[in-house]
Amino acid sequence: MRLREYIERLEAAGELQRIKTKVDCRFEICEITDRVSKSEGGGKALLFENTGTDYPVLMNMMGSDRRMAMALGVESLDEISQRIDDLLKGVMSPKASMWDKLKMLPLLNDVAKWFPRKMSGRGECQEVVWRGEDVDLGRLPILTSWPCDGGAFITLPMVATKDPETDIPNLGMYRMQVFDRRTTGMHWHKHKTGARHYDAYKRLGRRMPVSVALGGDPAYIYSATAPMPDNMDEMLLAGMLRRRPVKLVKCLTNDLWVPADCDFVLEGYVDPTEELAVEGAFGDHTGFYSLTDLYPRFHIEAITSRKDAIYPATIVGVPPMEDAYIAKATERIFLAPIRLAIQPEVRDLYMPIEGTAHNIALVAIAKRYDGQAAKVAQGLWGAGQMMFNKYMVVAPSPADIRSKSEILGLLREIDFRRDLIWSEGILDVLDHSAPEKGYGAKLAIDLTNIDSSSPRRTITVPKTAHPAGGIQLFNTEFMAEAGILILYAEREWRERVDVVEYLTANNITSARYVVVFDHGAAGHMHPSDLLWLAAANTDPKRDITLYNETMIIDARSKRPGYGTNPPRFPNVVTSTPDTIHLVDDRWDEYGIGTLIESPSRRYRKLWLSDNAEW
């Protein structure tokens, strides 16, 4: 399915809004999209037809449950999950009879048909060719999303590389900062396959061919984000999703292959002997700016495109945004492989939006023996991209892990001496709260030991309290019923805050969880915002302490370089007041309905300073 075909389907389904008025690729498009993507149900896809370039920009194309399913050609993502589940059960189950396995042969024959096919000649993505001095990224509508970004970024690149020793290809998604008309950064983290290929070329002393595809079938874009096993071609996943092979064409300047029907291809190389470049900052999917760091340069030798090319893009920032729906699809699609190949006792997996993909995971298991929750947690922390998880909740399989009230009720009853599983390990490089880059503490909470027949704890949290220890009280009835007390520090982040003094002064003894936030969050955040902040701003080992039967969580911004605090602490991602006012004033021109308030008005109160970092 070509990108234009997908757009036609979105429009026919009432899932697309066209914006014909001229808009700026610097900040304006992203502020509009941020408002729409955070509206009820993810809003609609947006096609900006007048960008000041020859190309329209498509945004928020997969930013809802319905559009995510449409992008993958199904009515519900559960269809794909069931398809994979059936396949793996038939192939891997030790209980399957010979007859059962024979019945799988037609399906296995279909799998053989899904492998990508290399085509001769040129593809649609090579109808227009720019080489030499004609290569100019400035001719594309590449967006600058946020005010403290290091520049314009390509945000939906499908980066094609191959292992120089095995020739096995990989298609990954790594943001690309535009340095000049022919050069970008290549932001592949050290845990990613692209970085592993880079290291291999560096050992061999060879220049690394790289090609970047943009657009085409949305199944390609999704597959490039998926946590596929290393050495497995992402285009096989795309073929499985579409139930037909992806047609590939050879690039014009190197030996890499890309989807024939994508919209743009950037062909070039990375030189492993070249000095790394400063890349960033970037308003990232964590909701905070990822800070500057050193990454390779990508040199572009040719740009090819379709004649009717459309530029696809996305923005990331404070959740929820489009990436949350992509992550939700991954959660459903990859549940079967996790259950059958890694942890057979897993019955369900839920990664809430507030965890920004890695910070929070809830797992339901079929418990048969003591200590099983610890086994599951440790196993998942060693499985693919689950290694980046920081907080995990393991519940018994009858529990509905998507029910906030049910999970909060269980959390209220745990025994902190028995039910906490502490560990250390790999974290996302973008985790700004980690004491070391990419490494820190992990915490799993075992809910499988709770006796449902035991009487529930009585939680009494005062409605009013006296300030003490630099803290003032804020709580809602729902949080109080769950045993969660939310506090806000009156003092600046540099000052010491004494939570125990506050609890003692107000005779608070029954609160199970006490969470302390910066004073800027008081009165402005929804409960989901507070969960996002708490998960993002904490390291379990450093920021969680136990006092009697209460867990105290310090979710404030951290003083950089102090003790085990990170050396730098970033700002929350928001638009500037000037951009907010511009979009407010022009809203009626966009023709997309009633004015949607800017989410940045709320989140800007969390800013630490006028700089992107301390």
Image: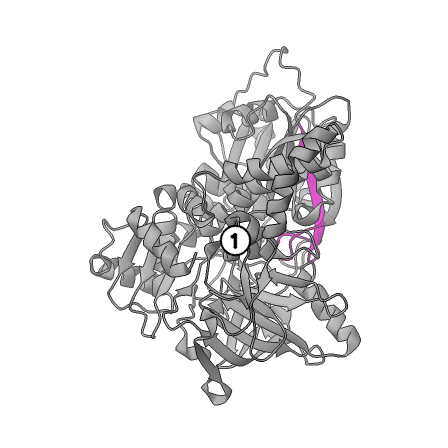
Mark 1 falls on what kind of element? helix
Question: What is the three-letter code of the residue carrying label 1?
Answer: Tyr
Is 389 a magenta residue?
Answer: no
Query: Which residue is more in the foreground, 283 or 338?
Result: 338
Q: Is 69 situated left or right of 188 in this image?
A: left
Taking the spot 70% from the left edge, 29% from the top edge, the residue there is 99
Residue 49: image location, x then y, percent: 30, 65
Query: Which residue is more in the foreground, 442 or 225?
Result: 225
Quadrant where the N terminus sits is bottom left
Residue 89: image location, x then y, percent: 67, 34
Residue extent of the magenta highlight: 426-446
Q: Would you name the residue on which mark 1 appears?
A: 222
Taking the spot 42% from the left edge, 59% from the top edge, the residue there is 2
For this orientation, the residue located farthest to the left is 588
Taking the spot 67% from the left edge, 39% from the top edge, the residue there is 338
Q: In this view, does 344 lie above or below 539?
A: above
Query: Which residue is more in the foreground, 343 or 391?
Result: 343
Quadrant where the C terminus sits is bottom right
For this orientation, the residue located farthest to the bottom is 133
Q: How is the image coloured?
A: one colour
Is 430 a magenta residue?
Answer: yes
